[in-house]
Image (cartoon, grey):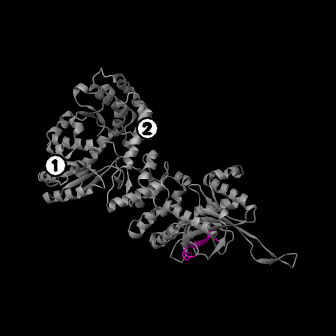
């Protein structure tokens, strides 16, 4: 229930100084829980009946305002959502009771949980709905993906009784999803002052019900000063809601020797248990939610985030009690700090959606509940109109999986895919598009032992050798270039797979020494073999076009490191497309860049890894990705 929570009777009411003038739920409104037939049967009003104390926080005011605004709209089917524990239920019930106090009988409240427990056949609801009138509003609470069948039935029943009914639907639980946006998120949590005041008032109520001679009285009285400590400890990881306060207070109240740390561990354990045992159902919508959740959990690191274009995010069912959704207008500094904006062709002023874990320390538990399988995502894309594979490929996550499978397949067979012709690639910045003809390709041998995965730890020896003018992303490119330069002194053919997030313009490097053709020497009639050394910078492209400027920037850094070496630096873009024509690169002007199409490499390369081959077939089937 809402903004918890001590007793309503004057006898046990916390004093005004402690609650800092918090406005209470009025007693004359709450009295209607005892005489409202609808509330008695269709709502869970036990906390009101027991006389618990409620205050009107910012969330309560804004939530009630949202209900009023939506009642005034012509729209008849409206969703309201918010993270769990803020008090949506108690605020909605209070609003309806307030309407009763003001003789407004045209709004009704139905708790689907109560329907499921007490009126499964909807007999009472059918009888009561006969009192509904034209344009009445029905607030349906605790709606989830696994109880929508009740909602569908109630809708039909009401529409048979009256014209133009309005439904306001309050989603709850882990399946509550972001639609256009999350109306009530993190910013509506309790601040420290509200939390501490409610904590003290609630504790006074609990203690007042017990005999002061109770042997635990002194311990329980000492909890009064623990509110601030609880807030400081829990707010590091959790969103501070009235429900959390209630749970923690009751746990600490029943212990005689427990600490705040013990309460934190117990609360976390309870949350984990709830996640692992949360309900599921057999429905197309739930299966979609399950898949989307597993994909997002897999691709978002615990304390990281992913970026989507606004229109792409609308295709997802994003569980708002699992993820936090933020609408964000891109700033100039963002383009410098995060290459994902550039790769997605987003610019200053564009609006994107950021998705991160709501509670990062519960992310692994959610992953256990919703395990991720790449095969399932590919299969789903094949049999349905779900665009999740397309979106996650364009947004980097699935593209990285394809890229990893592609590198692994080459390693397993001891080969690499290279362009027939090489030479130094030249780059100039440009704001125009460039159509690049697809190149002939060749398969070259590189033993599996010469495939290296390289991360930041492997680069530590080269930090002192990076030119001072290279910073940020360019510095990372320089470190890899120095690493490759070091290996090239003793190994003539190898592949280096970069294991650094947000790496600029390159997915992996191939260093290849080719004996080349025999040529006549200048001072001798003898023919000698000329070694041709080439460093290939390989990027796995997305979509029907790809940003070329980041490739070009990376190319220029690599060439700076290899400036005094007899090594050609050649840029390669790999695509998967049935289109045999040119490939579009944006914001660039290249000379001698190669575009290699995987179409036609199935037998020689792709079919040796069944998952890679399935992935490839789905890519070329999707028009958005070719």
Q: From which residue to which does the magenta span run? A: 589-603
Residue reaching furthest to the top: 213
Q: Residue at x 46, y 64 (%)?
A: 375
Query: How far from the left and from the top, in percent, is residue 377?
Result: 44, 63
The N terminus appears in which quarter of the rendering?
top left
Query: How far from the left and from the top, in percent, is residue 36?
Result: 15, 42
Q: Residue at x 67, y 54 (%)?
A: 479
In the figure, residue 423 lies in which quadrant? Answer: bottom right
Query: How far from the left and from the top, in percent, is residue 14?
Result: 29, 27
Residue reaching furthest to the bottom: 525
Query: How far from the left and from the top, in percent, is residue 111?
Result: 23, 48
The residue to which callout 2 is attached is: 265
Mark drawn on residue 106: 1
Residue 57 in the image: above or below residue 154: above
Query: Is residue 602 rendered magenta in the image?
Result: yes
Q: Residue at x 44, y 35 (%)?
A: 233
Position of 404 with respect to 297 (left or right) is right
In the figure, residue 385 lies in which quadrant? Answer: bottom left
Position of 74 with respect to 392 (left or right) is left
Q: Earlier in the sequence, mark 1 or mark 2?
A: 1
Q: Residue at x 18, y 39 (%)?
A: 33
Tell me, yes or no, if residue 589 can be seen here: no
How many numbered badges does the structure rendering display?
2
Tell me, yes or no, if residue 603 can be seen here: yes
Q: The residue tagged with tag 2: helix, strand or loop?
A: helix
Query: Is residue 42 rendered magenta in the image?
Result: no
Position of 339 with respect to 246 (left or right) is right
Mark drawn on residue 200: none
Q: Nearer the viewer, mark 1 or mark 2?
A: 2
- Circle 2 packing at 10 Å, graded few (<14), some (14-19), many (20+), is few
């Amino acid at each position: 229930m809402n903004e918890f929570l001590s007793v309503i009777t004057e006898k046990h009411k916390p004093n005004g100084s402690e609650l800092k003038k918090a406005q209470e739920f009025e007693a004359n409104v709450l009295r209607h829980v005892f005489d409202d037939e609808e509330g008695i049967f269709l709502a869970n009003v036990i906390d009101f009946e027991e006389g618990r104390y409620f205050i009107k926080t910012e969330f309560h005011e804004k939530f009630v305002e949202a209900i009023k605004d939506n009642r005034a709209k012509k729209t008849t089917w409206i969703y309201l959502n918010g993270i769990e524990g803020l008090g949506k239920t108690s605020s909605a019930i209070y609003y309806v009771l307030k309407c009763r106090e003001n003789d407004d009988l045209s709004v009704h409240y139905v708790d689907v949980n109560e329907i499921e427990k007490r009126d499964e056949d909807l007999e009472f609801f059918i009888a009561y709905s006969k009192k509904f009138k034209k344009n009445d509003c029905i607030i349906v609470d605790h709606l989830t993906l696994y109880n929508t069948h009740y909602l569908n039935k109630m809708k039909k029943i009401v529409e048979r009784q009256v014209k133009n009914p309005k439904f306001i639907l309050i989603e709850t639980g882990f399946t509550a999803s972001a639609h256009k946006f999350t109306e009530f998120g993190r910013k509506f949590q309790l601040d420290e002052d509200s939390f501490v005041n409610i904590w003290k008032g609630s504790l006074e109520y609990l203690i007042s019900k017990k005999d002061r001679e109770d042997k635990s009285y002194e311990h329980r009285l000492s909890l009064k000063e623990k509110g601030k400590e609880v807030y400081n400890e829990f707010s590091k990881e959790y969103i501070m809601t009235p429900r959390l306060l209630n749970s923690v207070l009751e746990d600490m109240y029943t212990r005689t020797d427990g600490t705040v740390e013990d309460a934190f561990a117990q609360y976390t354990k309870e949350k984990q248990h709830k996640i692992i045992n949360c309900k599921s159902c057999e429905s197309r919508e739930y299966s979609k939610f399950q898949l989307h959740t597993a994909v997002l959990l897999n691709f978002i690191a615990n304390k990281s985030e992913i970026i989507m274009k606004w229109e792409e995010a609308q295709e997802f069912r994003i569980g708002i009690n699992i993820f936090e959704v933020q609408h964000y207008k891109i700033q100039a500094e963002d383009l410098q700090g995060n290459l994902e904006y550039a790769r997605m062709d987003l610019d200053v002023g564009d609006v994107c959606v950021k998705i991160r874990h709501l509670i990062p320390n519960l992310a692994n538990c959610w992953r256990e509940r919703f395990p991720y399988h790449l095969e399932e995502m590919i299969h789903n894309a094949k049999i349905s109109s779900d665009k999740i594979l397309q979106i996650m490929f364009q947004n980097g996550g699935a593209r990285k999986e394809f890229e990893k499978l592609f590198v692994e397949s080459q390693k397993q067979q001891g080969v690499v895919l290279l362009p027939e012709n090489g030479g130094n690639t030249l780059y100039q910045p440009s704001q125009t598009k460039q159509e690049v003809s697809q190149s002939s390709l060749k398969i070259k041998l590189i033993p599996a032992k010469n495939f290296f995965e390289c991360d930041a730890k492997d680069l530590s020896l080269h930090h002192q050798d990076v030119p001072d003018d290279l910073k940020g992303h360019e510095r990372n490119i320089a470190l890899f270039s120095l690493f490759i330069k070091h290996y090239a002194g003793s190994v003539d053919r190898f592949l280096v797979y970069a294991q650094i997030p947000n790496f600029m313009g390159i997915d992996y490097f191939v260093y290849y020494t080719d004996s080349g053709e025999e040529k006549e020497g200048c001072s001798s009639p003898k023919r000698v073999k000329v070694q041709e050394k080439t460093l290939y910078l390989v990027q796995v492209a997305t979509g029907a076009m790809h940003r070329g400027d980041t490739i070009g920037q990376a190319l220029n850094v690599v060439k700076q490191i290899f400036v005094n070496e007899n090594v050609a630096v050649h840029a390669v873009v790999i695509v998967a497309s049935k289109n045999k024509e040119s490939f579009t690169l944006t914001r660039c002007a290249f000379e001698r860049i190669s575009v290699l199409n995987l179409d036609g490499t199935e037998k020689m390369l792709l079919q040796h890894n069944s998952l890679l081959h399935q992935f490839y077939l789905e890519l070329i089937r999707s028009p958005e990705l070719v």
